[in-house]
Image (cartoon, grey):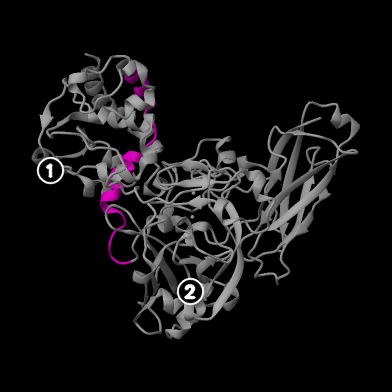
């Protein structure tokens, strides 16, 4: 029987194929929010991050075992026996491959033995074998765990069900991941019925309604960007189509129950304090214009060079807004915190993973205490209360930094002598050499992204748009931004591969350099020669220069990295002239 052959063959192939799989297993809990697989949760205390989550999310984040596809394709051609299905489903022929793959863990396999929950629980360490369950499936990942960077975390999940995790990390339920998971299947779990996938009791049942214009890069957790053409139309991005970056289900917080914990573990200051929402709103109100950009913005362009792990963001994972709230430096000083270059400030949100660990990130204390740093405990966005997707009732805005540090649904702030030990601070959102791969990467050797590099993007015209030449010119619009408060000095454009350049007109705030946290919109009228008008298409390039004369690199080949972050090469758009 093919399924029996597949199981036995795959167990033999596991050893010979481990190096290949190891390269494919770079995805971790971080990309759960990002493969989401791009801006997050952990605890800065002694608690290890996502102990059980790692085991489940690792299985969710693994890449495809391509050697397995042919055998599984054969399996999919066999009709499922209706008597062995826990749920009533259409015949296999009526299902596409991915829809059928989603039924495997709900289907009893007659070619495999049945195990009880107690049987699985006994396989909770390497010497006994490492088993996990998903639906009706029992999976042996003993040989898999040692070859994965997070193998020690997988051991913490041994003997447990991964269903609660996959209920949250829905983006991992793809055909290729399910195929690889099925290759580890050794039996059936003895229980009456498979878990129901409907919304009743689901962690996603209370998700907010989103604007129809937002284009999702993942639905669970919800991550989406607006059409790029809309971004260049408003200096302040309208709240309803400001990009959304979530890593976990959106929490529901009642304003009268909200509390923000402040703790000082290192350095000078009052040890602890708790503020409610009214107390925060009574503090002096400060407003700062700041662009927030996901670390994975424009990842889809980098992926064209070579695949990376992460959500396939276009150039719309960025927005510019006025953020209002209490300044963090005022709050910390009121607690007696003194400047100390060695210390850090950790932020934790109310969005929790299945092990009750919150999203976490940190910034240097020097940034938090600097009045020119403009770090705000924001409760308003463009003069409106924060929406739930954007962190209601309080989120921290850290102007000039990667979106991942701007923690939403803020519930805890800690001054301490170390960075957050959150996975998203320690093992994600870091840049690497183009030659670094998942076999050689060492996240502990790279600095966490804080200030973002200079970048720009063409908002209109969009790729492949038919553009009318008006008196020998076309009009091009876009945005530009640089992290660290650096003002955009110039945006240069070319239509002839860099032989000639044209400088755009800028729309930007008149604020001092070093506090220029908002983006700049730009417009350019580009000449089109008679010879160019005879060609079927025209490629426009854009590059920005900031106040430190940092300039975007020309090609993605030279800045490619395995996580697809910091994607700031020239933005290039090919259009058709009419």
Percent from the top left, x then y, of residue 501?
A: 82, 46
- Residue position for label 2: 365
Q: Main secondary structure of the magenta part?
A: helix
Please tell me whether residue 283 is drawn above or below residue 297 in the rendered image: below
Percent from the top left, x then y, of residue 101?
A: 33, 27
Q: Does residue 61 appear in the picture of this structure?
A: no
Percent from the top left, x then y, of residue 116?
A: 9, 36
In magenta stretch: residue 112: no
Q: Secondary structure at mark 2?
A: helix
- Residue position for label 1: 121
Q: Does residue 52 appear in the picture of this structure?
A: yes
Quarter of the picture holding the N terminus: top left
Distance from Cα at disc 1 to Cα at disc 2:
45 Å
Percent from the top left, x then y, of residue 108?
A: 18, 25
Q: Earlier in the sequence, mark 1 or mark 2?
A: 1
Bounds of the magenta segment: 45-73
Question: Dividing the picture into quarters, in which one does residue 124 lie?
Answer: top left
Label 2 CA crowd tier, 10 Å (few <14, some 14–19, many 20+): many
Please tell me whether residue 538 is drawn above or below residue 68 in the rendered image: below
Please tell me whether residue 18 is drawn above or below residue 256 in the rendered image: above
- Who's the residue at 25% across and 18% down the image? 80
In magenta stretch: residue 69: yes
């Amino acid at each position: 029987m093919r399924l029996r052959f597949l199981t036995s063959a795959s167990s033999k192939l596991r050893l010979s194929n481990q190096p290949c799989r190891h390269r494919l297993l770079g995805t971790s809990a971080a990309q759960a929010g990002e493969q989401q697989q791009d801006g997050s949760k952990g605890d800065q205390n002694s608690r290890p991050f996502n102990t059980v989550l790692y085991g489940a999310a690792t299985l969710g984040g693994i890449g495809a075992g391509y050697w397995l596809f042919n055998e599984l394709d054969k399996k999919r051609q066999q009709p499922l026996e209706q008597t062995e299905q826990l749920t009533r489903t259409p015949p296999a022929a009526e299902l596409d491959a991915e829809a059928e793959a989603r039924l495997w863990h709900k289907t009893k396999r007659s070619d495999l033995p049945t195990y009880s929950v107690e049987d699985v629980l006994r396989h909770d360490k390497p010497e006994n074998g490492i088993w996990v369950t998903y639906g009706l499936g029992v999976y042996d990942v003993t040989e898999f765990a040692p070859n994965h960077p997070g193998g020690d975390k997988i051991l913490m999940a041994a003997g447990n069900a991964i269903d609660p995790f996959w209920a949250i990390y829905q983006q991992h339920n793809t055909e290729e991941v399910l195929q690889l998971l099925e290759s580890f299947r050794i039996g059936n779990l003895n229980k009456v019925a498979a878990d129901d996938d409907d919304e009743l009791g689901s962690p996603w049942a209370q998700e907010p309604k989103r604007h129809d214009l937002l284009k999702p890069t993942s639905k669970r957790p919800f991550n989406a960007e607006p059409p790029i053409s809309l971004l260049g139309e408003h200096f302040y991005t309208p709240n309803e189509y400001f990009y959304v970056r979530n890593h976990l289900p959106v929490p529901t917080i009642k304003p009268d129950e909200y509390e923000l914990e402040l703790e000082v573990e290192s350095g000078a200051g009052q040890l602890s304090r708790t503020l409610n929402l009214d107390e925060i709103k009574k503090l002096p109100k400060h407003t700062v214009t700041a662009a927030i950009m996901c670390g994975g913005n424009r990842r889809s362009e980098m992926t064209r060079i070579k695949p990376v792990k992460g959500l396939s963001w276009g150039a719309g994972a960025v927005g510019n807004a006025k953020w209002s709230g209490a300044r963090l430096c005022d709050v910390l000083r009121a607690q007696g915190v003194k400047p100390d270059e060695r210390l850090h400030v950790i932020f934790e949100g109310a969005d929790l993973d299945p092990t009750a660990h919150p999203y976490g990130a940190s910034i240097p204390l020097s940034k938090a205490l600097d009045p020119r740093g403009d770090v705000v405990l924001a409760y308003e966005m463009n003069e409106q209360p924060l929406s739930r997707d954007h962190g209601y009732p309080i989120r921290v805005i850290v102007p000039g930094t990667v979106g991942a540090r701007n923690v939403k649904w803020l519930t805890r702030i800690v001054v301490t002598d170390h960075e957050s030990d959150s996975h998203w601070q320690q093992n994600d959102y870091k840049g690497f050499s183009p030659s670094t791969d998942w076999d050689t990467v060492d996240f502990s050797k790279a600095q966490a992204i804080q200030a973002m590099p200079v970048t720009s993007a063409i908002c209109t015209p969009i790729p492949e748009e038919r553009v009318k030449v008006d008196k020998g010119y076309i009009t091009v619009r876009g945005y530009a931004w640089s992290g660290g408060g650096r003002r955009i000095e110039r945006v240069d454009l070319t239509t002839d591969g860099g032989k000639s350049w044209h400088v755009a007109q800028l729309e930007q705030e008149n604020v001092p350099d070093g506090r220029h946290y908002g983006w700049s919109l730009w417009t350019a009228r580009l000449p089109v020669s008679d010879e160019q008008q005879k060609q079927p298409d025209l490629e426009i390039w854009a590059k920005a220069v900031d106040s430190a004369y940092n300039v975007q690199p020309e090609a993605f080949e030279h800045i490619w990295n395995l996580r697809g972050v910091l994607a700031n090469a020239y933005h290039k758009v090919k259009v058709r002239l009419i």
